[in-house]
Image: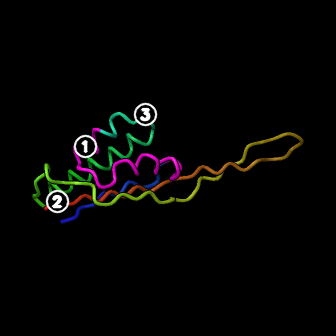
Amino acid sequence: MEVRAITKFVRLSPQKMRLVVDQIRGKGVEEALNILKFVPKRSAAIVTKALRAAVANAEGSQRVDVDRLYVKWVAVDGGGMEKRFLPRARGQATRIRRRLSHVTVVVDERT
């Protein structure tokens, strides 16, 4: 029984988030949490939070054994951009585009 958790509008680019997400795909939940604990990137804390939310959803709604859960599917999608302008020389402006991400974590029970 697969259970999902979605974290939306994270202020980090999808490219940076995917570096962390690729390390936990297909692993057991406990092993994935241990990997994320020692990854020195800012996105590791965000992915950890989403993974814990998926485990809590599975435990609360489906009554599954938490020890048998594994990360079935993880995706990081672009979530739009925050657009800002920075003043530059001679009255010009430079556009700043801050990328946002959506993180989707799906956990399932290993048979």
Of callouts 3 and 1, which one flags the residue occurring earlier in the amino acid sequence? Answer: 1
| Magenta stretch: includes residue 27 | yes
Do the numbered discs 3 and 1 sit on residues whose CB atoms are within 8 Å?
A: no
The residue positioned farthest toward the right in the image shown: 90
Q: Nearer the viewer, mark 3 or mark 1?
A: 1
The residue positioned farthest toward the bottom in the image shown: 1
Secondary structure at numbered mark 3: loop
Q: Determine the CA span between mark 3 and mark 1.
A: 16 Å
Q: Residue at x 34, y 49 (%)?
A: 24
Image quadrant occupied by the C terminus: bottom left
Q: Is residue 100 left or right of residue 108?
A: right
Image coordinates of residue 95 in percent, x first then y, are 72, 50
Q: Determine the CA span between mark 3 and mark 2.
A: 29 Å
Image coordinates of residue 3 in percent, x first then y, are 23, 61
Q: Which residue is mark 3?
A: 40
Provide the residue span drawn in magenta: 11-34
Do the numbered discs 3 and 2 sit on residues whose CB atoms are within 8 Å?
A: no
Number of numbered discs on residues: 3
Q: Which residue is mark 1?
A: 31
Q: Is residue 13 left or right of residue 91?
A: left
| Magenta stretch: includes residue 82 | no
Q: Quadrant of residue 65?
A: bottom left
Secondary structure at numbered mark 1: helix
> Which amino acid type corresponds to the residue marked 2 in the rendered image?
Glu
Q: Residue at x 38, y 54 (%)?
A: 7
Q: Which residue is mark 2?
A: 109
Q: Nearer the viewer, residue 61 or 104?
A: 104
Q: Residue at x 84, y 46 (%)?
A: 92
